[in-house]
Amino acid sequence: MGIDIGGTFTDFVLFDEATGE
């Protein structure tokens, strides 16, 4: 995973996918 959706923080991949930001 890592940077996939938002592509900003690899550590926040879970939070990134949740928000979709």
Image (tube, rainbow, N blue to C red):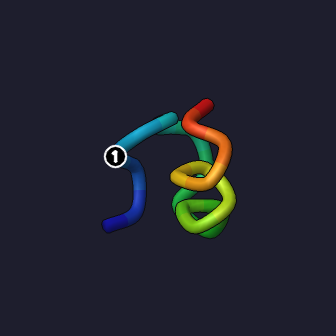
Image coordinates of residue 9 in percent, x first then y, are 61, 51
* Number of marks: 1
Q: Splitting the image into 4 quarters, where does residue 5 fall?
A: top left
Seen at 61% across and 54% down, the residue is 18
Residue type at mark 1 is Asp
* Crowding near the residue tagged with mark 1, few <14, some 14–19, many ≥20 C-alpha atoms within 10 Å: few
Seen at 66% across and 42% down, the residue is 19
Q: Is residue 8 left or right of residue 5?
A: right
Seen at 60% across and 50% down, the residue is 16
Q: Secondary structure at mark 1?
A: loop
Image coordinates of residue 1 in percent, x first then y, are 31, 67
Foreground of the two, 3 or 15: 15
Q: Quadrant of the C terminus?
A: top right
Q: Is residue 5 left or right of residue 13?
A: left
Q: Splitting the image into 4 quarters, where does residue 14 fall?
A: bottom right
Q: Which residue is mark 1?
A: 4
Foreground of the two, 8 or 17: 17
Q: Is residue 2 left or right of residue 8?
A: left
Seen at 62% across and 68% down, the residue is 11
> Is 4 drawn above or below residue 11 in the view shown?
above
